[in-house]
Amino acid sequence: MTDSPKRILVLGVGNILFTDEGIGVCAADEIARLYDLSDNVTVMDGGTLGTRLMDPIMGCDLLIVVDAVLGDGEPGSIYRLTGEDLRKSLAFKDSMHQTDLVDTLIMCEIVGTRPDAVIIGMEPFDYHTLNVGISEVAKGRQEALMGFVLEEVVKAGGSCSLKANPSPITQEREPCA
Amino acid sequence: MAPKTPQSNFSGPVVVDPVTRIEGHLRIDATVENGKIVDVRSSSQLFRGLEIILKGRDPRDAQHFTQRACGVCTYVHALCSTRAVDNAVKVKIPKNATIMRNLVMGSQYLHDHIVHFYHLHALDWVNVANALQADPAKTAALSNSLNANRKETADQFKAVQTKVKALIDSGKLGIFTNAYFLGEKKNEAYYLPAEADLMAVKHYLDALHMQVKAARAMAIFGAKNPHTQFTVVGGVTNYDALKPDRIAEYKALTDEVIAFIRDFYIPDLLAVASFYKDWAGIGGTSNFISFGEFPTDEYNHDSRFFAPGVIMKRDIAKPQAMDQKKIEEHVKHSWYVGDKAHHPYNGVTEPKYTKLEDKDRYSWMKAPRYNGEACETGPLATVLVAFAKGHKPTVDAVTLVLKYLGVGPEALFSTLGRTAARGIECLVIANQMQTWLDALVGNVKSGDTELYTPWKMPNEAEGVGFVQAPRGALSHWIKIKKGKIENFQLVVPSTWSLGPRCANGKLGPVEEALMGTPIFDPARPVEILRTVHSFDPCIACGVHVLDAKTGQTASFKVL
């Protein structure tokens, strides 16, 4: 008997209306647009849906979250956090600055099926300005960000290849590329 | 004697910020004298000038942006923008498209109200820590006595206690962080018996499973999971949802959710309410507005299953028709330029921030008024209007609830009434879902599979979309010029219910509701949360940046 391949969910989260808040969603959209992925890989725009994401999250074995992350680095710095980092930060932190994504993972755990999670995140340049489209700094690092995400995908047993004829960018997503 | 909300003689300021779990979103600034609130300001700390982003874009694209304005209410904004453009371009959408939009909206209601009651509101009434003191066998007996379909066992409740104890002992409280029932001294403002606490905690966990199913049902018809993408100007595009196996899948999930609402949500609501009956005299407001929802004819507002309407000064003998011309948005006490009130078609969004402590201009929300009055919106407004108009399913459900609690209709004008109304609305919709589904199936069987009506973009037009979302009255107002968006205004439920004072100094509904509220422990003012949460304030709007700067534990890897 052979093990079925790991089900991998690439989940871009954030709000596309606040400049680099949308880094994760833009990266997920661009990966879906530019790459053919193996059947065990799903790419999803999670927005800021929080608990609405429990169903897809609980349906995967590995969750790769792409998000804006504040980590003291220069804007454009790319980080890798594991689920354990998130757990720690939550246990010791008094602030409520942690968001619904963390709550959602805890809820998945309480319900009984929390997948392994890794977060690939980028330090935002500007995540306050109401604006559709990511900053120049983030744009310059987007390919690298996507590269790290795809590296995780491959490491977990997924595969990806560049599409020969990617669909054009839709107007609503234009600022991502 | 039944326990009552304890009183104190505290005087001083009480600030709750954030009210929700998202920092910097909603702040309540109250002045307390001798244990009661005598002055209060509700302040939104988040600027949402979406109007600026939309100007100059294709009207059809509005929904892609508006559905991101609020974190979780994506569909209601998408629908509202679509209705606004439908209205502007004067397209008549097919019957099935209306049913499909209603079914997805129905699923959204079932999902949101379950989540609100168990996950956003229950912990204002239920003491999770106290659940550890409960006798599991007695808890099972209590729970099973509430509904004949419940078959719960002492072992199940024991397992829940073990789970909760592990969570509290680990310090990784997560979703319970900073809850007002925590602390060295028991918070006397919570007074459910331990068994009722434990019962509610178990159903909190069960409801987590159930809301996943409700969301999945919504996704079946909503086409793209998890953001719905099936609404278009002229109808809908989810042709896949007309297939018998998709409909069967939707029905199976929905039936399960409906059974949970009947057997658990409503009995739990009644049980908790019966212990907190003094809250039927706290937290009420005067005026109510509902846009009504679930049309059979998109062009006839009176065709909506829940009728639109207005109730003034609690007069349920005289429900008034809703006239959109009487809606205005004030900015005199908000962080915008000037003090002139505008009808939404002529709305202006010109931000001018002063400072956090400002008592004069203190919110990013504008202050919507109907005929000059602040109006509460949401389930209580919808239920009151429907009840006042003699809508039978609503009258039956309201009667059932009032009878169980042994109170009259005047009890509806309260925090408890608001929370009960949400359950009533949910039950009435749940009971109606099958009828809508049958209508869809009947149409498909007779060969009517039409979902879309073609239309042409006019050079100049204006239109409005009215949605009664789970949180309340939502409207999008569009002006089109040269085929592009010239002006776009959103008047959202949270601004109706949680907005600030208007130019005439009249308090916003949540402010009115909080006046006179008793505060027992100023460090844990759960009484404020009870009333604010009963309005279902938006919790996930805006930003979602992940803060990993956690001091001692920031050990993640830089790539």
Image (cartoon, coloured by chain):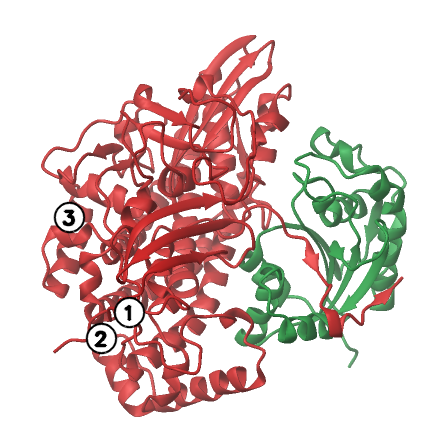
Chain colours: A green, B red
Mark 2 and mark 3, same subunit? yes
Residue hosting label 2: B146
Q: Earlier in the sequence, mark 1 or mark 2?
A: 2
Which amino acid does the dot numbered 2 rest on?
Answer: Leu
Query: In the figure, is residue B530 to the left or right of B395?
Result: right
Which amino acid does the dot numbered 3 rest on?
Answer: Val
Q: Earlier in the sequence, mark 2 or mark 3?
A: 2
Task: Look at 42% across and 20% down and name the residue there.
Answer: B340
Q: Quadrant of the N terminus of chain B?
A: bottom left
Q: Chain of mark 3?
A: B
Query: In the figure, is residue B62 to the left or right of A159?
Result: left
Q: Is residue B177 above or below residue B458?
A: below
Q: Quadrant of the C terminus of chain B?
A: bottom right
Q: Are marks 3 and 1 in contact (CB under 8 Å)?
A: no
Residue hosting label 1: B268
The one of A44 and B191 positioned closer to us in this rendering: B191
Which amino acid does the dot numbered 1 rest on?
Answer: Asp
Query: In the figure, is residue B178 to the left or right of B368?
Result: right
Q: Chain of mark 1?
A: B
Q: Are marks 1 and 2 in contact (CB under 8 Å)?
A: yes
**For the residues carrying marks 1 and 2, which lies nearer the camera in this image?**
1
Residue B326: tell me if it is visible. Answer: yes
Q: Is residue B469 above or below residue B550?
A: above
